Image: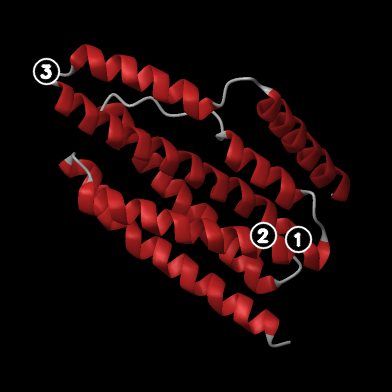
């Protein structure tokens, strides 16, 4: 069983390293494709800029969501804390649902999403998965909390300032789930600091 996990982790790490070594970040590639599509379809410069802003937000959100699912899958079996494992399983389920929604919206809005994690997210996956035991738990929780804080900000900006009504509604709907995850992670972290 451990061999299988070690093999899966090694494969994920190798894939990540290959992705990090690529000269083009998947974010840059997706942004370039979106920019070309938007410019060819936009009626005015201001409508193109608005669509591009929304598309860039969706790219960041999609990659961050993918990263959280990847890390949570690892944490579900690698974490030493049962509470972290439980939280990780919840995150896999709920963020996988969010990923489906993001992909559908992106398809409906003709937004190209990155095919893999953007470089900064891939580097975090490599850093966290390299740890073991309590060091893994700490690193995972630190990244989880920081990323959820960033995600809440990004979703709030999209909900408040987005240019597309469906994207704004999606962001508003997702915010309570992100806040719940952050609060649960803060509780777990507080409990572990008090031990």
Query: What residue is rendered at 55% in x and 48% in y?
Result: 69
Distance CA(mark 3)–CA(mark 1): 50 Å
Q: Which mark is residue 136?
A: 1
Q: Which mark is residue 140?
A: 2
Q: Residue furthest left?
A: 43
Tell whether 132 sits left or right of 109. Answer: right
Find residue 181 and report its horizontal and vertical position in percent. 47, 66
Query: What residue is rendered at 38% in x and 24% in y?
Result: 112
Nearer-N-terminus badge (3/2):
3
Disc 3: which residue: 43
For the C terminus, the image quarter is bottom right
Element under disc 1: helix
The answer to whether residue 115 is visible is: no
Query: What residue is rendered at 60% in x and 34% in y?
Result: 119
Nearer-N-terminus badge (3/1):
3
Q: Contact, CB < 8 Å: mark 1 with mark 2? A: yes
Find residue 141 and report its horizontal and vertical position in percent. 63, 64
Query: What residue is rendered at 80% in x and 55% in y?
Result: 131
Of residues 69 and 30, which is closer to you in this image? 30
Q: Residue furthest right?
A: 3
Q: Is residue 138 above or below residue 105?
A: below
Q: Which mark is residue 169?
A: none
Tell whether 52 sits left or right of 190. Answer: left
Check disc 3: other Cα within 10 Å, few if <14, some if 14-19, many if 20+: few
Element under disc 2: helix
């Amino acid at each position: 069983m451990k061999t299988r996990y070690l093999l899966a982790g090694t494969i994920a790490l190798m894939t990540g390293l290959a992705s990090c070594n690529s000269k083009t970040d998947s974010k840059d590639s997706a942004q370039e494709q979106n920019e070309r599509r938007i410019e060819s379809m936009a009626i005015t410069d201001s409508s193109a800029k608005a669509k591009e802003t929304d598309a860039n937000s969706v790219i960041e959100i999609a990659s961050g969501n993918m990263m959280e699912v990847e890390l949570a899958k690892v944490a579900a079996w690698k974490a030493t804390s049962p509470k972290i494992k439980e939280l990780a399983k919840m995150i896999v389920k709920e963020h996988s649902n969010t990923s489906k929604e993001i992909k559908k919206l992106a398809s409906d809005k003709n937004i190209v999403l990155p095919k893999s994690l953007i470089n900064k997210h891939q580097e975090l996956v490599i850093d966290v998965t390299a740890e073991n035991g309590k060091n893994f738990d700490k690193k995972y929780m630190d990244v989880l909390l920081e990323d959820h804080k960033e995600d809440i900000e990004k979703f709030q900006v999209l909900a408040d300032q987005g240019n597309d009504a469906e994207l704004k509604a999606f962001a508003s709907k997702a915010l309570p789930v992100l806040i719940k995850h952050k609060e649960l992670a803060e509780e777990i972290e507080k409990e572990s600091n008090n031990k």
